[in-house]
């Protein structure tokens, strides 16, 4: 975009609003960072900074505004700045714009006393900055560190939350950015117990923020995850410390897992309990953790959450229990998918295929209404049939899996069937064609593409001309005339239903692809035909005229 003709390339509403800003004198400050970069401060609901970088011919090579506008590439503040800059250039006043000095150069010339006064003045106006300075640079004991952390968190919340007690989508990003400063403190302190205290203050507020914030971009979720990861790293770092400190750290984490803030966010509670296993080498702590998990198992947890808790217990049993205890624990919890799968995999390794079949069939009955799990158990059963060389059972199950959407089993089935492979293919193809469900139709298409059955693909495209673009390259060498004929009808149909410029452009893109198939002469014939058909659609004619 060039500064000399920018008005022709910007949304009219934004252009008008920007022009009003320019006329009303909303540009309150102008300076340059060099001969080709200009900065404008534009007054609006806040003061916004617009930066414009120009080439000598007026081409705008960079333009940005720090306002929150996100409904298009150019905002009204930038438009106002364009008008202002164009006026300066035309009046030859552009070289008189003051060059702003670098902040660091200004600060370097100030005395310590002057710097202190400036910082105090700014900090009095910005409580977050004040608390951040106290938090980062203040020398205090652990109790005061935690209090400073509380004050900083409170000031960040108060700064960003609105009168309605809600954190808007745009504020959430800045909120989490400033909260990340607290996380840095937890990371950088050498006192691991203090690190846990700080992390838990942040974690509590971040989880509560789910209730009062718009977290559409997942920023708060990321903050929670990073904080829990910091707790995990701190717990791991405790391994080399005295038992008394390790026990205190364990108790802090276990106590935090009981916090009501996790009600409704059980996955985060379970994460903390999983972190507690870092201390499970101490029998007394392992017993304490086991008792806590067993207590929670009696609560109102979902099946998935209970399975996650049991996985924590399984991990400890595997590491600190006997082989017999581990096997008994798994066997007692076969109603849970991960335990059943673990037990089945063990049986597979031991080539106990009959047991695998029995467990898989039981899983299929239990999970008959869950397609993903049902498919998993069937695939495992197929593996067991294969291990036992039960070809009849394999063939039947491979076909079941194929028809349910697992095309990989076509190759298994193909290997299993005896006799004429072409007769097998033709029979399967006909069976799939007669089935009208979308899943089976998808398998049918994969089949004819895999076997490169061009006659069948052509018949399919004749019935579904909207798929011609997908298959034209495959078909054109053998069926060029048919492809051109279908493509022509396809483009005409698209043109007859097009009613706006975007749809006209889409038709023209199809015409460009058509040229590669049919050649330039055919393309011109069809283009001229469309011109005659849609002579009363000037926007369409305009787009058609752009095709080369």
Image: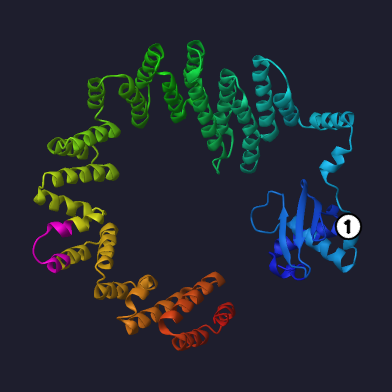
Residue 264 point in image, percent of width and height? 46, 29
Point 69% across, 68% down: residue: 9
Pick out the residue farthest to the front: 240
The total number of labels drawn is 1
Q: How crowded is mark 1: few (under 14 residues within 10 Å), some or many (20 or more)?
A: some
Position of 547 compared to 352: left or right? right
| Image quarter of the C terminus | bottom right
Residue 165 appears in the figure: no
Residue 394 point in image, percent of width and height? 14, 50
What secondary structure characterizes most of the magenta part? helix
Point 62% across, 41% down: residue: 173
Relative depth, front residue between 391 and 241:
241
Relative depth, front residue between 24 and 280:
280
Q: Is residue 292 magenta?
A: no
| Image quarter of the N terminus | bottom right
Relative depth, front residue between 207 and 106:
106
Residue, disc 1:
97
Task: Check the image and tell me how it is coloured.
Answer: rainbow
Q: Is residue 330 above or below residue 539?
A: above
Magenta region, residue range: 413-425
Point 30% across, 73% down: residue: 463
Q: Does the magenta stretch include residue 414?
A: yes
Q: Is residue 428 above or below residue 199?
A: below
Residue 106 point in image, percent of width and height? 87, 41
Residue 191 point in image, percent of width and height? 59, 19
Residue 324 appears in the figure: yes
**The quadrant where residue 427 appears:** bottom left
Element carrying mark 1: loop
**The quadrant where residue 97 appears:** bottom right
Q: In this view, does 370 lie above or below 338?
A: below
């Amino acid at each position: 975009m060039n500064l000399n003709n920018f008005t022709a390339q910007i949304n009219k509403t934004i252009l008008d609003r920007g022009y009003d800003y320019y006329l009303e004198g909303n540009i309150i400050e102008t300076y340059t960072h060099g001969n080709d970069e200009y900065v404008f401060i534009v007054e609006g609901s806040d003061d916004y900074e617009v930066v414009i970088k120009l080439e000598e011919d007026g081409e705008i090579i960079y333009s940005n505004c720090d306002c929150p506008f996100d409904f298009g590439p150019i905002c009204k503040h930038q438009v106002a700045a364009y008008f202002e800059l164009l006026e300066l250039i035309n009046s030859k006043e552009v070289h008189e714009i003051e060059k702003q000095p670098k902040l660091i150069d200004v600060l370097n010339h100030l005395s310590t006393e002057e710097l202190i006064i400036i910082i105090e003045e700014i900090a009095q106006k910005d409580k977050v900055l004040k608390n951040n300075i106290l938090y980062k640079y203040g020398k205090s004991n652990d109790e005061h560190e935690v209090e400073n952390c509380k004050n900083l968190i409170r000031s960040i919340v108060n700064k960003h939350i609105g009168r309605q007690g809600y954190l808007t989508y745009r504020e959430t990003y800045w909120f989490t950015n400033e909260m990340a400063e607290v996380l840095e403190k937890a990371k950088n302190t050498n006192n691991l117990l203090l690190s846990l205290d700080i992390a838990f203050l942040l974690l509590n507020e971040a989880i509560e923020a789910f209730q009062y914030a718009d977290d559409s971009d997942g920023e708060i979720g990321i903050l929670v995850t990073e904080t829990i990861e910091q707790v995990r790293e701190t717990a791991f770092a405790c391994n080399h410390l005295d038992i008394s400190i390790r026990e205190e750290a364990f108790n802090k984490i276990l106590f935090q897992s009981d916090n009501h803030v996790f009600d409704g966010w059980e996955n985060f509670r379970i994460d903390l309990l999983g972190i507690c296993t870092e201390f499970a080498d101490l029998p007394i702590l392992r017993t304490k953790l086991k008792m806590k998990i067993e207590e929670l198992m009696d609560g109102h947890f979902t099946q998935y959450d209970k399975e996650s808790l049991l996985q924590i217990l399984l991990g400890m049993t595997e590491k600190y229990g006997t082989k017999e205890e581990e096997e008994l624990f798994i066997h007692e919890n076969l109603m849970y998918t991960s335990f059943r799968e673990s037990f089945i995999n063990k049986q597979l390794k031991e080539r106990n295929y009959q047991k695998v079949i029995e467990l898989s069939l039981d899983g299929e009955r239990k999970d008959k209404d869950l397609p993903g799990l049902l498919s998993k158990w069937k695939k495992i059963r197929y593996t067991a049939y294969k291990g036992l060389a039960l070809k009849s059972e394999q063939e039947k199950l491979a076909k079941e899996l194929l028809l349910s959407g697992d095309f990989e089993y076509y190759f298994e089935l193909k290997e299993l069937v005896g006799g004429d492979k072409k007769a097998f293919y033709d029979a399967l193809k006909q069976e799939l064609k007669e089935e009208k469900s979308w899943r089976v139709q998808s398998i049918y298409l994969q089949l004819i593409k895999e076997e490169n059955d061009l006659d069948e693909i052509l018949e399919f495209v004749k019935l579904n001309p909207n798929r011609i673009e997908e298959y034209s390259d495959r078909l054109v060498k053998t069926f060029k005339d048919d492809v051109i004929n279908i493509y022509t009808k396809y483009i005409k149909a698209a043109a007859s239903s097009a009613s706006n410029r975007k749809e006209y452009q889409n038709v023209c893109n199809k015409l460009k692809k058509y040229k590669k198939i049919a050649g330039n002469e055919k393309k011109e014939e069809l283009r001229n035909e469309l011109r005659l058909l849609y002579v009363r659609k000037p926007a369409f004619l305009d787009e058609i005229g752009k095709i080369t």
